[in-house]
Image (cartoon, coloured by chain):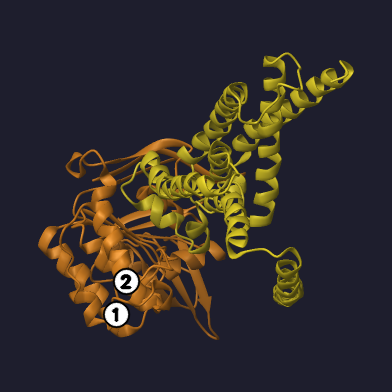
Chain colours: A orange, B yellow
Amino acid sequence: MITVKDLSFSYGKLKVFENFNLDIPEGQVCLITGINGVGKSTLLRLMAGVLRPAKGEIIFDEKLGDDPKRKIGFISDILSLYESLTVSQSIELHKSVYGISKFDDSLIRHTKIGHSQKIKELSTGQKTIFHLSLILSIEPEVLLIDEIIHSIDAYLRRIFLEQLIQLQSQRKITVVMVNLNFHDIEHIVERVILLKKGEVAVDEKIDGLKAKVKKIISTSPPQTIPILSQIDFSGHSEFFVYPFQEELRNQIRGEVVDLNLTEIVSAFIGGEYA
Amino acid sequence: MLKKEFSDAFKQFMECMILLLGVPLGVLFDKLIIHFGWKLSDIFHYVFLITMVIYPVVAGLTVFQSERKDRAFEYLFSLPLSRLEAVRYKIAPRFLFLLLLIIASIFFSIFKNIWINGFNLIVAFFISAFMSISVTSFVLGVVGVSFIFFAYYQTSRVIQLIYIGWNRVKFSDFSTAALLSDLLTAALLLFLIGAAFWLTFKNLDIRPLKLQLKFYYYIVMPIILVFYVFIILLFKKFTERGG
């Protein structure tokens, strides 16, 4: 669905990507993560077309037609909208640009957003839900969501994720998310891509990743498996290892613990700061 | 932090001072009305003239104001609009209002024997609109527009003088020669500045503007310089002839 081909991009002298390649198939829910400043949001913005690559290209499936932007929904972390417009004016603008006649406002009514309210008067959560309802109105094939879910309250987050799950199950859309808080989205994500210095450091399906990243609680480091990061306690240490192989389990002195997605990504990110 | 707070406090202070200035200006205006015995129609006339001068510059310089203020460039660029459509949508309504103002000024000129050069207002509008991409301070924008508009105006006068054979007696702001020289100068200047604007906007994204405006300045600055050199050299020649 999305092919990133030989992409190069920089902010002035600061090089972010050089000959970067990535392929995201149709219908996949993909999580892009990495330490701050690694280029996660930049990659998403390049996919959304709000940043232009210096070299290379981002190719979308022919299914999206001549103008892929018509079928791409993008929610950025800054929630960019015309703040001085009212909700109804924003809806009208959106309808006229995308050429849509109907707009389902049930989601915004559900979250107590008034049509006459100005966008700047909305809370971050309300703005996120409003942005999502704008995007849903275009029936997107690709959804790009920047680090925003964790900044909204639990109730609105649930609504947001319910909509996402519903959309995904009904229409099998492609979702690319950038996030650092994985607790809520663990059950949705199929693939995890970890960026490091402008390159893909880890690219795994979530089940594969859970099988390969483990925590070993021991007094001494494991000899046969690479350590991503470690936390020392008095008397013992926790070693986060990757790639773990099941056949080595018997050789390890200590307890092998399974990890959830948040812990896995923290282990990778912790390794980068070490 | 202190620098930011100092700057904010200074801005507030200046805004208050402007408000304070309003009172003596109002009193002064009242005294002028009494002193010169102005009628309501006179006052309307002057206010209209001032509006005519201000509107094209304000309308042009604020083309991207909402995107800047609301940080909505990202939203604008995420929409399925070509850059040409985006520019058209931004400029067309403002241009339409300017045309309405010019038409109103034509009707107004029937009752008052003062002509407003609508063509120059259109030129001022487009100079401002093409500068809007590079201007973050409105005051600096007005200075920049005035500087470029002066280059246009004086170049046009010089071309007219060349056309009519350096004859000051024949010189008029509302002659065919003036119209032709205005057209020629405006076409040349607006084409070049417009090209710089378009080539920059076509490739514009949400990176900081200062990273993306080099090309714009590389085109606009030499153009203005050439216009000023042209004016100075030919006016020098004009004065040497004893004009």
Q: Nearer the viewer, residue B216 or B128?
A: B128
Residue type at the position of mark 1: Gly
Q: Is residue A164 left or right of residue A147?
A: left
Residue B220 appearing in the image: yes
- Which residue in the protein does label 1 denote? A114
Kindly identify the residue that appears in the image at 49 percent across and 41 percent down.
B201
- Which residue in the protein does label 2 denote? A87
Q: Position of residue B79 (x, y in %)?
A: 33, 51
Kindly identify the residue that appears in the image at 55 percent across and 41 percent down.
B130
Quarter of the image holding residue A124? Answer: bottom left
Q: Nearer the viewer, residue B194 or B76?
A: B194
Q: Nearer the viewer, residue A34 or A132?
A: A132
Q: Position of residue A202 (x, y in %)?
A: 38, 54
Q: Are marks 1 and 2 on the same chain?
A: yes
Q: Is residue B65 left or right of residue A152?
A: right
Q: Is residue A66 left or right of residue A263?
A: left
